[in-house]
Image: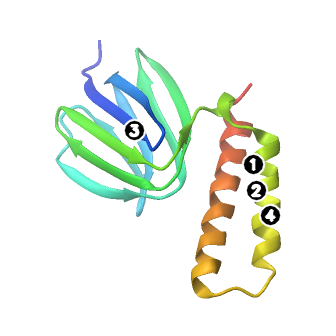
Amino acid sequence: MAKTFHLEIIAANRIFYQGECEHLVITAIDGLLGIMAGHEPLVTVLPTGELKYMVNGQWHYAAISEGFIQVMPESSVILADTCELPEEIDIKRAEEAKERAQEQLRQKQSIHEYYQTQAALNRAMNRLKISQKHFK
């Protein structure tokens, strides 16, 4: 049996996962980050991306939005705005959000509005990518 560590994934609206984990792979601000039991302590920012974690030898996938991760040798905690399993993603809603964001980007906006719209587009595209890649 592989050595495990305690993993908590907390989204703004729910505790997404809480339990033992063998491996964790997540997109960090400077690239992919792989975590196993005994990892050096670390705190970093998480952009919108894919999260995958192994429990009992099986990989689980999720679409995650902006957040933070704290890694300790025996545990890791992820705090994110949203976290969804591929089968939880409403593809029609994600497509509509993508189209809205693309239309807003074509309009004149302040810098602040532009960054908010770009973030919305990134979230929608990530949700679509994860649902298409992992939902069967």
Instruction: From the image, tell me which residue sits under label 3.
Output: 10
Query: How busy is the neighbourhood of tag 1: few (under 14 within 10 Å), some, or many (20 plus)?
Result: some
Q: Give amino acid for label 2.
A: Ala
Is label 2 in a helix, a strand or a loop? helix
Instruction: From the image, tell me which residue sits under label 1.
Output: 94
Mark 1 or mark 3: which comes first in sequence?
A: 3
Is label 1 in a helix, a strand or a loop? helix
Q: Is residue 73 above or below residue 125?
A: above
Q: Give amino acid for label 3.
A: Ile
**Image point 35% across, 53% down: which residue?**
68
| Cα gap from disc 3 to disc 4, whole angstroms | 28 Å
Is label 3 in a helix, a strand or a loop? strand
| Cα gap from disc 2 to disc 4, whole angstroms | 5 Å
Instruction: From the image, tell me which residue sits under label 4.
Output: 100
Q: Give amino acid for label 4.
A: Arg
Q: Are marks 1 and 2 in contact (CB under 8 Å)?
A: yes
Q: Position of residue 37 (x, y in %)?
A: 23, 31
Q: Are marks 1 and 3 in contact (CB under 8 Å)?
A: no
| Residue 105 found in image quarter | bottom right
Q: Is residue 27 above or below residue 73?
A: below
Q: Give amino acid for label 1.
A: Ala
**Image point 17% across, 48% down: which residue?**
41
Instruction: From the image, tell me which residue sits under label 2.
Output: 97
Is label 4 in a helix, a strand or a loop? helix
Q: Are marks 3 and 4 in contact (CB under 8 Å)?
A: no
**Image point 75% across, 66% down: which residue?**
101
Mark 3 or mark 4: which comes first in sequence?
A: 3
**Residue 134 vs residue 109, the one in the foreground:** 109
Q: Position of residue 113 (x, y in %)?
A: 63, 79
| Cα gap from disc 1 to disc 2, whole angstroms | 5 Å
